[in-house]
Amino acid sequence: MPLKLYNTMTRSVDEFTPRDSKTVTMYTCGPTVYNFAHIGNLRTYVFEDVLVRALAMAGFDVNRVMNVTDVGHLTDDADSGEDKMEKGAAREGKTVWEIAQYYLDAFEADMEHLHILPPTVWCKATDEIDTQIDQVKILEDKGFTYTTSDAVYFDTSKLPDYGKLSRQNLDELEAGKRVEMGEKKNPTDFALWKCSPEGTQRLMEWPSPWGVGFPGWHIECSSMAIKYLGEHLDIHCGGIDHIQVHHSNEIAQAEAALGHEWCNWWMHGEFLLAGGKMSKSSGEFLTLALLIEKGYDPIAYRYFLLGAHYRQQLQFSFEGLDAAASAIKNLTRIVEPLRAKATGAEQPIQAAMASYIEAVNDDLNMPRALAAMWNATKLDAPAGEIYATLLEMDKVLALGIATMAEDTSDLDPAAIDALIVDRTTAKAEKNWGRADEIRDELMAMGIEIMDSAEGTTWRKA
Ligand code: AMP
Ligand code: ZN
């Protein structure tokens, strides 16, 4: 079954084909690094990671670019508000550059914890100011901009199909927007370059043909995507909140500058809901670091996310996360003995792989893919073949099948082994009372023992 994906632009699930039959160009909107990513943000990055891995499983090479929004920009999509980076720096008594590096490092640590593959290219907005200025100049030369006393704006009324991604026409979009118009001509117009207010010096500002200031957020993504991935993009993704403004504006800028359609496939991940605990600007949000601090294995969070289709909203709950953590624990208990018996030469079981691949290729249906994985663990087949199958499936699931192991750091394996030897001796001497006593002693330590023809093994109860 070929890989089929939903395209927000066409509103349909279709067979995916890149322009070049082998390599997929993909741009994913990256993190804003003025604070930690919240677990909702991470849901979007896990969805994108599943996409990258599914593309690889389907035989494509993926050339993926992810930006880092380290320019302060504005607190929302309206063109007013505080600079997020300056706000973060003031909050923490650091420089804006220190803030950006600190939160980028934290984001990369989150990615690693969740087994999210790094992009082929990372690009920081502050390293690419010239790229952004060049794009604004092109738009200016082509007549898509106008300047006000303090900014260069994109004139959305110049593009007849503005808003085609959200399928709202300009009138509908304008009616729905209550923004400070200031000197803007249309409510949907947006800043390409914003000048620093006269007489003030911002912590992050750069010279430009329009005055000292900083680029708009939308131009960051489209200009860097074109620079690194060329005039035609296969896939662009992000969270669902980006459809109406950010991605619509990226399309407007890119297509106005290029003079042709830009990106073939738009993919958006639905939101993770967590009551009021998901607002980065208010500072109230759940982070992966907090889940780890509470004792959760970060992979339990990945498993929790895979339990819902990426186009459906998902309600976060600690009960749900507990269930995911138990599933990982159970899986570990199944995997460890399989791994012990595998030689490494076994092949995945084709029939099991077929139903798994069908689920992944059906617009990344990970709940079904997980079910296919559990079915594989129950197959009546040699341990090594089941293990090889799980390893193959893990190329997309990325639960860490190859290395998953029970956490025994709180145990003293030498003491447990010594007790097991004593018990074996007691049994050999037909001292059943002592053997039972040792079993109970181990049970009280939270250790379960299993006797077999090969001897006695143990695990955490
Ligand atoms: P930001 O760092 O705020 O630019 O967001 C990073 C990514 O997370 C973007 O792709 C957003 O669309 C996405 N996002 C924001 N909030 C949520 C949420 N609650 N659930 C899932 N994705 C989100
Ligand atoms: Zn973006």
Image (spheres, rainbow, N blue to C red):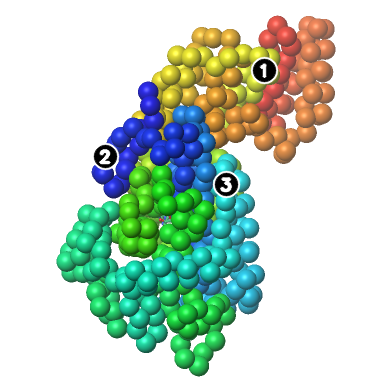
Residue underneath mark 1: 344
Name the disc covering residue 120, or none: 3
390 versus 157 height, above or below = above
SS at mark 1 in the image = loop
Kind of residue at disc 3 = Thr
In this rendering, the label closer to the viewer, 2 or 1: 2
SS at mark 3 in the image = loop
Whether residue 299 appears in this view of the structure is yes
Residue underneath mark 2: 12
Residue found 53% across the figure and 69% down from its top: 130
Q: CA distance from mark 3 to mark 1?
A: 30 Å
**Percent from the top left, x then y, of residue 214?**
49, 76
Kind of residue at disc 2 = Ser
Residue found 82% across the figure and 18% down from its top: 422
Answer yes or no: do the residues labelled 2 and 1 have beta carbons within 8 Å? no
Residue found 44% across the figure and 43% down from its top: 47
In this rendering, the label closer to the viewer, 3 or 1: 3
Which of pointers 2 and 1 lies earlier in the amino acid sequence? 2
* 264 sits to left or right of 458: left
Image quarter of residue 424: top right
Foreground residue among 442 and 59: 59
Q: Residue furthest bottom?
A: 199
Image quarter of residue 16: top left
Q: Can you tell me which quadrant of the image ligand 1 is in?
A: bottom left
**Percent from the top left, x then y, of residue 370?**
45, 29
Query: Mark 1, residues whose alpha carbon is within 10 Å: few (<14), some, or many (≥20)?
Result: few
